[in-house]
Image (cartoon, rainbow, N blue to C red):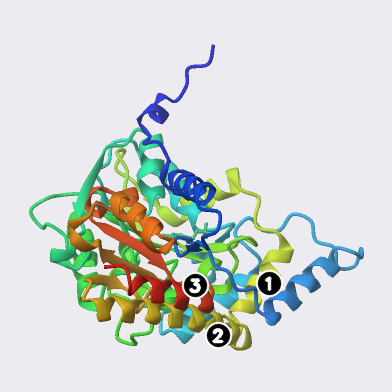
Amino acid sequence: MPKLNENYLNLKENYLFAEVNHRVRDYSAAHPDKKIIRLGIGDVTLPIGSEMIEQLHEGVDAMASSETFKGYGPEQGYEFLRNAIVDYYKRNGVSVAAEEIFVSDGAKSDTGNITDIFDKDNIVLIPDPVYPVYVDTNTMNGRNITFIDANAENNFLPMPDHSKHVDIIYICSPNNPTGAAYNHEQLKEWVDYALENDAIILYDSAYECFITDPSLPRSIFAIEGAKKCAIEFCSLSKTAGFTGTRCGYTVVPKDLKYATSNGGELSINAMWNRRQTTKFNGVSYIVQKGAAAAFSPEGMAQCKENIKYYQENAKIIASTMDKMGIRYFGGVNSPYIWFECPKGMESWEFFDYMLDKIQVVGTPGAGFGNNGKYFFRLTAFGNRENTIEAMKRFETLL
Ligand SMILES: *Cc1c(COP(=O)(O)O)cnc(C)c1O
């Protein structure tokens, strides 16, 4: 009989979206005449821009003739895409090398798989509330997790406790679910803390493209010293509408090295390369063709058009919160609006209240951690008409 990885017994039931759907289904069955608007989704809804679509088609056509056919590609990604990403970083004022970029099928896989290269015995610091992948993948590996409180008092941007040592630090900025984004000075403090503690920062930058404030860093590598202590995870999912097409990339600096118990040292870049070449066979040529187009100036301009549409939705939601005097976070450099449930309600209670009174669906903050208990997430990924209608109804809520 196989001995199972019983760390899986320690995973919390992943019931958030299942429970949301369950409650919506029940309500809908009881009130078939009511039109429900969903502002809970964490998925994009606009189609992919034509620059990317054209290149996806070219990728498909290349498979049709023996002259252009592609079989296995490099596990790390094609040079044309890695170079396009280098160039994109350069336009944002950050210098990275092509060998530091690993193309993948998305940031979820990479943020989860990165746990492979770390020993079980590490002090892992994860903010609460948080994107659940960091917690669950470390739990699967049997690692203990230390949580750091993100709350209204720290604007959902927790800062390091210099009196305590940790080894691995997860940061997601702009944040899912809170929409909060660190500024340069705050990130510098995290980088300095990591360098002092010989720790590593695992930086999830999936929402980088939603940053509108030019003073905010678009990459952890905009911070001095970060190449000696950080990995950055990026994704085309929210940037280019690739949630279904699947493409991401992770930047692992060559300077990132840590001591081993035998007195030597290991390069994190070399370890990740070994991990990927062993367990991963690369992203399809077709998808990489489409992805590369997203980094061209024309392709990026199209991506920005879609992002602008979502940002306008975010503004509509945020202005409703302003009007109603509800305290909220995010909504500016992020597609998420994270607000305090009115009347001291808990998030699931507010979920039912909102569904019953105005038939608008969002995501209860409790699903992202203890500190989300009295908070609620709405997303800007819906269509304009529904967002406007939902906010019109919201104004009648209290
Ligand atoms: C959407 C999202 C991602 C992207 O995941 P993909 O696997 O690239 O689709 C990564 N991190 C966070 C926090 C996200 O919300």
Tally of numbered discs:
3
Q: Is residue 181 visible?
A: no
- Report the residue at 48% width, 51% height from top: 272
**Residue 110, position as x, y percentages in the image:** 49, 53
Outermost residue toward the top in this view: 1
Circle 2 residues within 10 Å: few <14, some 14–19, many ≥20: few
Q: Which mark is residue 97?
A: 3
**Residue 312, position as x, y percentages in the image:** 44, 83
Q: Are marks 1 and 2 in contact (CB under 8 Å)?
A: no
In three-dimensional space, the C-alpha distance between marks 1 and 3, rounded to whole angstroms, equals 21 Å
The N terminus, quarter of image: top right
Q: Which residue is mark 1?
A: 290
Q: Secondary structure at mark 3?
A: loop
**Residue 39, position as x, y percentages in the image:** 45, 65
> Could you tell which of marks 3 and 2 lies nearer the N-terminus?
3
> Which is closer to the viewer, label 1 or label 3?
1
Q: Which mark is residue 231?
A: none
Q: Secondary structure at mark 2?
A: helix
- Report the residue at 10% width, 58% height from top: 162
Amino acid type of the residue that numbered disc 2 sits on in the rendered structure: Glu
